Amino acid sequence: MPLTSIVLAKFHLPNTTIHNFDIDSQANTLASSLVSRDPDLSKRMIFHTTDVLNAKKGLDQYDVVFLAALVGMDKESKVKAIEHLEKHMAPGAVLMLRSAHGLRAFLYPIVDSCDLKGFEVLTIYHPSDDVVNSVVIARKLGGSSEARNSEIGRCVVMSCNCSKIHGIMNSRGMMKNMIEEFSTVE
């Protein structure tokens, strides 16, 4: 299910059209049915049924590509998908992908910085709460300095490494962590 793109489209990117690629036609049918109940979302969410390794044409038109955690369930296939995206994404475009850290690597493969050849790693965030996936944000290298300094390049995560963790007390007097949302350059 394209939950990330639904949340982004609904609450954070109200004027953006989002293209969702999934290898599973049933997943796309279900997702399309889900967003069809919202007239605005149904106009802005487009579903493509294809393997990411077959998606070539048009990838250079996207400003941001999200690579889901379930794409490439082992290290080799994850790296293969990243290499494919590097060949077909536009210079300066941002790749956001899910990884894992520590014991969470039993669930998902770890993506190391060295796996992102052709990308500049902007930040890696490892959660300290119940969230399973780490987030890696990288920018596709190449292109002119103008492209690298464009709005895409300036809309990067600040040095806070995606978030700040604050200790808070819950109603039972137990210490919990609260994560402050992403900070970006306006």
Image: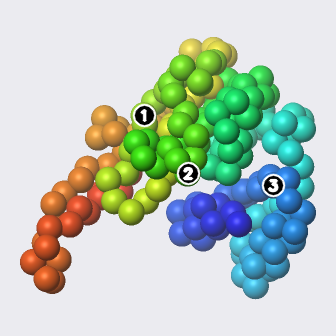
Quadrant housing residue 91: top right
Quadrant housing residue 97: top right
Residue picked out by circle 1 = 123
Residue picked out by circle 3 = 22
Residue closer to the observer: 50 or 12: 50
**Is the N terminus in the top left, top right, bottom left or bottom right quadrant?**
bottom right
**Is the C terminus in the top left, top right, bottom left or bottom right quadrant?**
top left
The crowding category of the residue bearing disc 3, from other C-alpha atoms within 10 Å (few below 14, some 14 to 19, many at least 20), is some
Residues tagged 3 and 2 counted as in contact (Cβ below 8 A)? no
Callout 2: SS? loop
Q: Residue at x 20, y 66 (%)?
A: 176
Callout 3: SS? strand
Residue closer to the observer: 10 or 29: 29
Q: Point out the tag, 3 or 1, that comes first from the N-terminus.
A: 3
Q: Is residue 39 at all visible to an observer of this figure?
A: no
What amino acid type is highlighted by mark number 2? Leu
Residue picked out by circle 2 = 107
What amino acid type is highlighted by mark number 3? Asp
